[in-house]
Amino acid sequence: MTNSYGSIAWWGFSPALDLQETGFQEMCKKLSCAMPEELNILLVGAGDVRHILKTVARRYRHSNRKLRFYILEPSLELYARDILLLMIFLENQQNYGLQEKTELFLEVYGNTLVRRQTSQYIEKMAHELILMVTDFEYMAKKLAFINLTQLKYKERDYLEGILKFWRNKEKKYPFEISKCWDLRLRQLLGVRYDSRLNVFDWDYNMELIERGGSIVYIRQYKDWRDTGVAFKIREGTYDVPNRTLASAMVFKLDGERFPRRGYWGDMLVSPYITFGVETEEKSFYKKQNNNHIKTAEDVSEFNITSLFYEFTNKQKYQLPQPEPQTEKSSEAPKLQEITEEDEEEQTTAEDGQSELENDVDKEKNNIAKDVELMDKKEAVGDTNDSNSLQHDQEPQENVDNLDKKEINCNDNKSSTSSETEKDDHEWMPLEDVEVVFLPMAGIEELMKKAKYNKLFNVVYFSNSMVHHLKPDLANIFADRCSVILETALFMLDIKKNTVQEFVKKISQMAEAAGCKPLEAWDDLQDSYIKFYFERGANP
């Protein structure tokens, strides 16, 4: 991978999948076998929780069964971000409406800069997550479906440090993500930086459109490439750095190692691919003058709203239809005839306004007289002796003490209210679902533990982690297992013939592990390829 994709994948490079429908259900139909009552799903390097959200939101479309997701990523920052996105997904409608929750999710998911209220939400949830990471009983009380018990102690400590940086309670550690973005952009483009908009235009027209991303609006794509802000669904000020996109990277210079925190993620593909290029609502694909009338931002908003709605209501989300205009609303405004009664009412209103202004003037004069009288009293008071001065100061000291008591009381009330708010914040329950975060040791460690032997019914590999697919890995596959591999279709700076070679290579790796193609694919059209594994079947 080149530096354009960075060292950490904040989002995936393929659309979200319902892992019950895609791969496993198709395999069961092909092999004429019944689906088990429990599915164990391994996600290797997915980069985000898009597959989890879509699979969980559409559970009602399938038979009721328990889902257990195992997440393996190369960075703990992704674990923290995954949990935060799941928390947004499960926010109660009493706290956030459907539209507001969608906007919050997309901002955190794909924007380097967010609104101030979004940043405040991140800080608040970071505080909650610190309590959860350090106290598993509290986590079991709040988010029982999350399982961090597999992590090592040092990994939990590092995770806590990430969340403390998110919280930024002391405001000591500024994160200038816009500066980080611009510096990396300068480094990547070099002498082409001044003509970067032309570079973005070339990548869009010559690569993204050809690979199925034509619904991505060119202006939105170029704005994201230039600033890192992908979603501006609600008009507002996006000026607060999104700390969930910060990660650490170690540089070597003259034999010494220098850790630096910055933005080290994707700067080429964009977060539009995961939720913005595929949808069940076919009206989004309509074109006018050979151009899409909807954009990837519109599709992303609709897809996220659909997932939130389907999870809550257990039915498919329908696109709201515009209300037909009534005769009154369709009529143009007409001139209104002014009658004598209207003139009398207007005159009465003006008289009342003038009387009100006179009253205000009188009140101002009275206040001026009172101030003048107070000045005279102060002048007389200056001639009094020191005893009277001391006598006058005593009530002021009592007032100061009272103010301090009130401040302390308010502080106690605010701390009490914050504790109450912490205890009262509830998320929607997620029954028969568990999300297990695996340690950073790597997938090879799974093969050494007996509890993972023949466990996983579905295994997903991203294109950056597919090199872990080796013949020995078949030991953790269930007797019938669906294997899904992400291709390099949307890796825009990889040439098409290289994309085809990549698909050929990973298909050979899958076959070496005992997998068979589930269906035919197109190297230059499909963003993932599907295999199945059947233990004991003839090779």
Image (cartoon, rainbow, N blue to C red):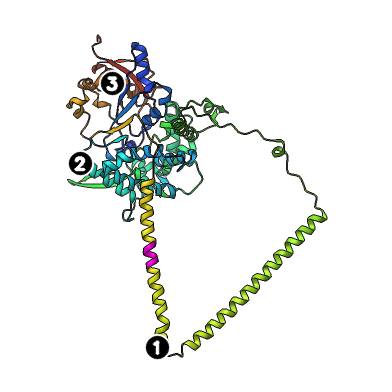
Q: Which residue lies under the disc numbered 1?
A: 387
Quadrant location of the N terminus in the rendered image:
top left
- Along the viewing direction, whichever of 71 and 345 lies nearer the viewer: 345
Q: Quadrant of the C terminus?
A: top left
- Whether residue 169 is situated above or below residue 387 in the rendered picture: above
Crowd tier of the residue under label 2, counting other residues whose Cα lies within 10 Å: few below 14, some 14–19, many 20 or above: few
- Disc on the earlier residue, 2 or 1: 2
Answer yes or no: is residue 242 visible: no
Q: Quadrant of residue 311?
A: top left
**Start-end of magenta stretch:** 405-409
User: Please, what secondary structure does the residue beneath circle 1 have?
Assistant: helix
Which mark sits nearer the N-terminus, 3 or 2? 2
Q: Residue 397: x percent and y percent? A: 39, 76
Amino acid beneath label 1:
Asn
Whether 93 is drawn above or below 36: the answer is below
Q: Are marks 3 and 1 in contact (CB under 8 Å)?
A: no
Q: Which residue is mark 2?
A: 153
Q: What is the distance, in whole Å, between disc 3 and disc 1 at their CAs?
A: 96 Å
Mark toward the start of the polypeptide (3 vs 1): 1
- Per the picture, the main secondary structure of the magenta-coloured stretch is helix
Q: Nearer the viewer, mark 3 or mark 1?
A: 1
Relative to residue 309, is residue 62 depicted above or below?
above
